[in-house]
């Protein structure tokens, strides 16, 4: 089934426009559509098609390679956009081949070997419609965001469907139905987009773990088994020895209410880069500073950086914008990519704004349990360091870490149940309880969420931080400065690791390979790579053309050669008189097998005299018989008479009624 | 249990596949495939616009489907004009007359023939082995999928294909010619026509049935045989015609020739013999009325055996060939019991034998010895015997030896696979090579040309 003229060309132009490859698309469209003007055709054998198919596979592999190098996160999308180029040699081969089709069996190596000759002959296909759809999907994959794309899509689809329509129905009905389909499709795509947006929004926190610097909803009180992913989120390395775990702060919160922490008065202020464009000063430098290198994938847009609490300066961080708030959260804004930077920090030091009244507030719902507890531990009678030590001892000895959340009785809050009965929970319980108990002891405290880097990977020779290393802890203002208080039992990383997937080593290996590839990709220049690949492609193309045009392979066939050659033992098979036969057959006057033209017309003379009884038919039949069976060769003038007579006869009879009720 | 589950699954998927092929046009199937692809690639509506392609094409396809669901039956009648016979592997051409009983012109309709359901029964699937199945891996052997495919291909006599209905004028009647190629012999049952009307987009079909039960006998494929010199005919002697075991002679003198062993002494031309001092025989116009037995070996372990099919084809070729040579032919084979059918010269017609050959099945519950008794019982009737055998093992060798010992001229044709690794062992009896022939599947005609 062939596509209508110019359809593929138009679709290629749409694809070129969408994917910003307009000029290559223009050339491709011109090549494919000019096959209607160029008379030459090539005779491709099955092995030629197999070679061209292999070339397409190589082009596809190159496309995948470039896409992976260019943007590993979107390589499938990029490959999809370049598919029309990869498949172009095959469709061009079909358009310029003598048969106008290709051997489907040559497309896959598996088929080439397995199929018999008989099956291969049956498996001759026309890929023009599949190529049309491929261009359409690729154009959609480019996502240039143009609102008119849908209308272009509708027009091209209508164009493609036009030759397939049923003759049974009037044009207006077809158009009406198409418009209905178009409207339904439009509504559907809007609905799908909205549904996707809704789902993204609903699952944003859960899937992305990209925290809100102003609000953190904890899993306190939920009845689920928390299962965190083993996915590696970022990596760390230090020049000197590091004592693990290192807590990397993401955001800090001050107010607690019903399982949610809020950051009050925490607007962000923009930081200005230093002269070398990659260095940023976050706070005042301190003595005994250490350096840590961080490799962190930043999605497009705003991201909270995971940094040690005492970070005062960042190096080699190339982002468009960097902001910080008074609670120590640092937010970057950039394109998607891997950020490799160095953080200078002072161990044990925490940069945060001075405490205020909000850092001593205990929500009314939690106050009874907290107060009861604080009294039982006699926290009010202790100094700052003693309180912290008491809390460490209390949580460490009488509580255990658990990811199984079993809910709580309706007469108690989840936190109260955690403190009084359950005595088991995850880090959010420990951190929240610690903050509120510190406040009950009169010590200003805040809640911090982030990650605990505790796993050294021998494979990567770096510290790897996984999604399951997400953590929460408390800040306490003791002796005029903020200190980190982490009361979660220290065995929590081990308990988390016990639930890791058995395939974690395999996924780690792939993650590491991907990480190395990204590093390599960042090192080399894309332009340089594209240039090399272009040279390689041109060389490959030349080599391929040389192989294909060798003596044993494809052969050019001129337009004269393309005329069907009648078999030597059956001259006159090109006689125009057969057009009359075909025309009569279409009218329902079947010629029976073995029935001669003369006998046929005699039979028709009775049933359809207006056609077969024509006086012009008999001389034309005589000319046909001469052409077919001799004697001699039918002269040029006689042949012209035959052609003109056949045309005139068909034209004259085109208005005649069809066979009706004759049997 | 597992096999039964597999069988039900294969039946279900085969039926749904057939339904899909009938309900959708090729364009519809391509579009459905594109919808499936875009459904996966267009999941991320924020990164690409592929979801727009998906929803548009899905809408078009759904409208087509809905349109094709609501079809008021069109009042048209169809009659099939079948020939009496068809031949396996040869095009069967017949006419179908359509009558439009409505006052509206009916255009763009198509139809396909509802024929025998090719799905095998569970028993058949479990009992019939695909040739070469032993070479398949354990999984394929146990899962029976290849066996299922093979059985379907063997049981399907013609391909399902849509044919165009000519544009029918209001209250008009038109005929169209249909050409199908039966792939195997047997009865080809036509149950009726499924008339199809596509939707305005040409993607889906609405179908309704017109019952028209009929059947045609598909005769076995036949090969060209050279002019046969049948075994058992004495040649060139005088006397009349006899429709009997040995030969008949005819009284037209042709020539004199040297004596050959076996010549009737009554035919000696004494004068010439005296002149030449050696025996000279009078030679007469040859007479062809001979009675031949055609023994068809039906003993195969498989219900669908290529070897057996070729043997049937060879037997049918002999039947056709002998028809032109005016001899009597008796076909002997064993089915559920032993059969002997005579034809030629005023008995049954040769067509009758071909019909029998079209329906003959393999015999799997008896051994080859079952044919020996009827053959020896009737052998006195025959002037010669043609044996078409499927193997050359001891029971078959014993039959041939027995016939040879009784002085019956015999022609043995053994059908084998074209497999050089499996030579026929231990070969023809000594002094018997001339009448012993091995033909290989795929090169049967070439083998028979040596006759």
Image (cartoon, coloured by chain):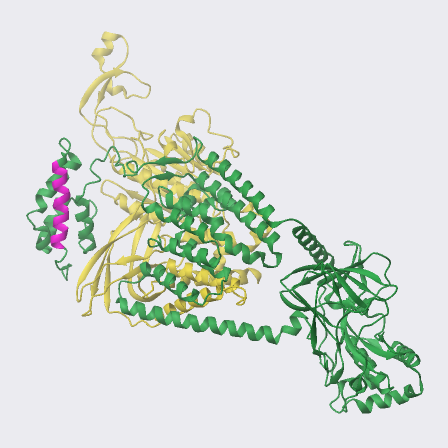
Chain colours: A green, B yellow
Residues drawn in magenta: A637-653
Left or right: B5 in relation to B53 = right
**Viewer-nearest residue: B63 or A217:** A217
| Location of residue A173 in the rendering, given as x and y in whole percent from the top left corner | 29, 70
Of all residues shown, which one is farthest toward the front? A275
| Location of residue A420 in the rendering, given as x and y in whole percent from the top left corner | 83, 86
Magenta residue check for A643: yes
**Viewer-nearest residue: B179 or A630:** A630
| Location of residue B355 in the rendering, given as x and y in whole percent from the top left corner | 31, 48
Q: Is residue A518 visible?
A: yes
Of all residues shown, which one is farthest toward the left? A615
Q: Residue at x 26, y 65 (%)?
A: A168
* Secondary structure predominantly adopted by residues drawn in magenta: helix
Left or right: A46 in relation to B96 = right
Q: Is residue A104 visible?
A: no
Which image quarter holds the C terminus of chain A? bottom left
Left or right: B111 in relation to B440 = left
Res A378 quadrant in image: bottom right
Above or below: residue A101 compared with residue A464: above
Res A512 quadrant in image: bottom right
Magenta residue check for B326: no
| Location of residue A523 in the rendering, given as x and y in whole percent from the top left corner | 67, 50
Labels in figure, total:
0
**Viewer-nearest residue: B396 or A512:** A512
Q: Residue at x 14, y 51 (%)?
A: A650
């Amino acid at each position: 089934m062939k596509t209508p003229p110019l359809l593929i060309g138009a679709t290629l132009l749409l694809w070129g426009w969408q994917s910003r490859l307009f000029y290559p698309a223009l050339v491709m469209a011109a090549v494919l559509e000019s096959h209607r003007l160029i008379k030459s055709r090539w005779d491709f054998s099955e092995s030629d098609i197999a070679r061209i198919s292999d070339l397409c596979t190589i082009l596809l592999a190159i496309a995948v390679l470039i896409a992976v190098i260019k943007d590993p996160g979107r390589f499938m999308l990029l490959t999809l956009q370049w598919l029309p180029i990869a498949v172009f040699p095959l469709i061009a081969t079909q358009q310029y081949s003598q048969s106008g089709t290709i051997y489907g069996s040559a497309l896959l190596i598996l088929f080439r070997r397995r199929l018999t000759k008989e099956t291969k002959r049956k498996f001759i296909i026309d890929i023009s419609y599949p190529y049309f759809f491929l261009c359409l999907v690729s154009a959609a994959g480019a996502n240039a965001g143009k609102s008119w794309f849908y209308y272009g899509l509708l027009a091209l689809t209508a164009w493609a469907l036009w030759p397939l329509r049923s003759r049974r129905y009037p044009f207006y009905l077809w158009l009406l139905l198409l418009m209905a389909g178009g409207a339904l499709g439009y509504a559907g795509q809007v609905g799908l987009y909205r549904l996707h947006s809704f789902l993204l929004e609903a699952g944003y926190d859960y899937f992305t773990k990209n925290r809100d610097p102003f609000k953190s909803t904890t899993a306190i009180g939920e009845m689920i088994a928390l299962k965190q992913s083993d996915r590696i989120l970022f990596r760390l390395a230090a020049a000197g020895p590091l004592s693990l775990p290192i807590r990397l702060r993401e955001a800090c919160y001050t107010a607690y209410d019903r399982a949610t922490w809020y950051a009050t008065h925490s607007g962000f202020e923009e930081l200005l880069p230093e002269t070398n464009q990659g260095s940023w000063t976050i706070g005042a430098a301190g003595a005994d500073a250490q350096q840590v290198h961080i490799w962190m994938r930043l999605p497009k847009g705003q991201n909270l950086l995971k940094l040690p609490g005492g970070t005062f300066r960042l190096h080699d961080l190339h982002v468009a914008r960097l902001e910080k708030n008074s609670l120590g959260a640092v937010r970057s804004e950039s394109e998607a990519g891997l950020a490799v930077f160095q953080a200078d920090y002072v161990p044990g030091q925490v940069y945060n704004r001075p405490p205020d009244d909000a850092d001593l507030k205990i929500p009314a719902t939690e106050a009874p349990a907290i107060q009861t507890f604080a009294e039982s531990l006699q926290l009010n009678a202790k100094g700052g360091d003693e309180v912290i030590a008491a809390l460490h001892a209390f949580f460490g000895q009488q509580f255990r870490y658990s990811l199984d959340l079993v809910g709580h009785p309706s007469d108690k809050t989840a936190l109260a149940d955690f403190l009084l009965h359950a005595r088991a929970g995850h880090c959010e319980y420990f951190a929240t309880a610690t903050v509120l108990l510190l406040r009950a002891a009169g010590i200003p405290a805040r809640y911090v969420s982030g990650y605990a880097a505790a796993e050294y990977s021998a494979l990567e020779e770096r510290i790897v931080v996984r999604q399951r290393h997400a953590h929460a802890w408390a800040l306490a203002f003791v002796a005029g400065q903020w200190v980190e208080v982490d009361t979660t039992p220290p065995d929590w990383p081990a308990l988390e690791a016990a639930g890791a997937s058995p395939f974690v080593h395999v996924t780690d290996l792939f993650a590491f390979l991907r990480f190395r590839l990204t590093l390599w990709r960042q090192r080399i220049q894309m332009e340089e790579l594209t240039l090399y690949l272009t040279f390689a492609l041109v060389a490959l193309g030349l080599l391929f053309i040389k192989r294909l045009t060798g003596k044993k392979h494809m052969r050019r066939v001129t337009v004269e050669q393309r005329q069907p050659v009648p078999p030597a033992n059956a001259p006159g098979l090109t006689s125009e008189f057969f057009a009359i036969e075909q025309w009569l057959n279409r009218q329902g006057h079947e010629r029976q097998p073995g029935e001669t033209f003369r006998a046929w017309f005699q039979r028709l003379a009775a049933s359809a005299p207006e056609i077969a009884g024509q006086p012009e038919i008999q001389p034309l039949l005589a000319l046909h018989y001469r052409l077919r069976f001799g004697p001699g060769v039918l002269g040029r003038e006689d042949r012209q008479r035959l052609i003109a007579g056949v045309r005139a006869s068909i034209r004259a009879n085109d208005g005649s009624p069809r066979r009706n009720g004759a049997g | 249990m597992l096999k039964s589950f597999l069988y039900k699954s294969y039946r279900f998927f085969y039926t749904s596949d057939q339904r899909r092929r009938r309900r959708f046009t090729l364009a519809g199937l391509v579009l459905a495939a594109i919808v499936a692809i875009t459904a996966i690639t267009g999941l991320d509506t924020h990164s690409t616009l592929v979801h727009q392609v998906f929803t548009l094409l899905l809408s078009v396809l759904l409208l087509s489907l809905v349109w094709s669901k609501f079809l008021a039956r069109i009042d048209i009648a169809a009659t099939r004009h079948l020939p009496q016979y068809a031949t396996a592997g040869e095009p069967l051409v017949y006419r179908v007359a359509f009558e439009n009983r409505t006052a509206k012109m009916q255009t763009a309709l198509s139809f396909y023939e509802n024929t025998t359901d090719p799905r095998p029964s569970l028993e058949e699937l479990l009992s019939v082995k695909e040739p070469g199945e032993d070479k398949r891996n354990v999984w394929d052997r146990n899962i029976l999928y290849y066996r299922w495919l093979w059985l379907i291909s063997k049981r399907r006599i013609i391909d399902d294909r849509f044919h165009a209905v000519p544009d029918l004028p209001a209250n008009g009647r038109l005929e169209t010619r249909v050409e199908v190629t039966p792939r195997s012999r047997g009865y080809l049952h036509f149950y009726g026509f499924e008339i199809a009307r596509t939707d305005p987009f040409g993607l889906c079909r609405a179908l309704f049935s017109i019952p028209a039960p009929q059947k045609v006998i598909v005769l076995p494929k036949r090969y060209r045989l050279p002019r046969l010199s049948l075994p058992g005919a004495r040649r060139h002697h005088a006397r009349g015609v006899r429709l009997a075991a040995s030969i008949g002679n005819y009284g037209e003198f042709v020539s004199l020739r040297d004596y050959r062993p076996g010549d009737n002494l009554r035919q000696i031309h004494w004068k010439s013999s005296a002149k030449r001092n050696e025996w000279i025989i009078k030679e007469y116009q040859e007479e062809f009325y001979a009675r031949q037995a055609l023994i068809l070996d039906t003993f195969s372990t498989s219900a669908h055996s290529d070897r057996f099919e070729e043997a049937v084809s060879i037997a049918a070729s002999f039947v056709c060939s002998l028809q032109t040579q005016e001899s009597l032919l008796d076909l002997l084979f064993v089915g559920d019991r032993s059969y002997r059918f005579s034809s030629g010269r005023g008995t049954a017609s040769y067509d009758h034998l071909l019909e029998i050959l079209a329906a003959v099945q393999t015999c799997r519950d008896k051994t080859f010895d079952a044919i020996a008794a009827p053959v020896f019982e009737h052998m006195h009737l025959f002037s010669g015997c043609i044996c078409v055998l499927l193997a050359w093992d001891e029971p078959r060798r014993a039959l041939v030896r027995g016939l040879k010992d009784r002085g019956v001229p015999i022609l043995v044709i053994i059908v084998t696979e074209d497999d050089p690794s499996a030579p026929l062992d231990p070969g023809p009896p000594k002094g018997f090579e001339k009448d012993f022939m091995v033909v290989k599947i795929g090169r049967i005609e070439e083998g028979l040309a040596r006759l």
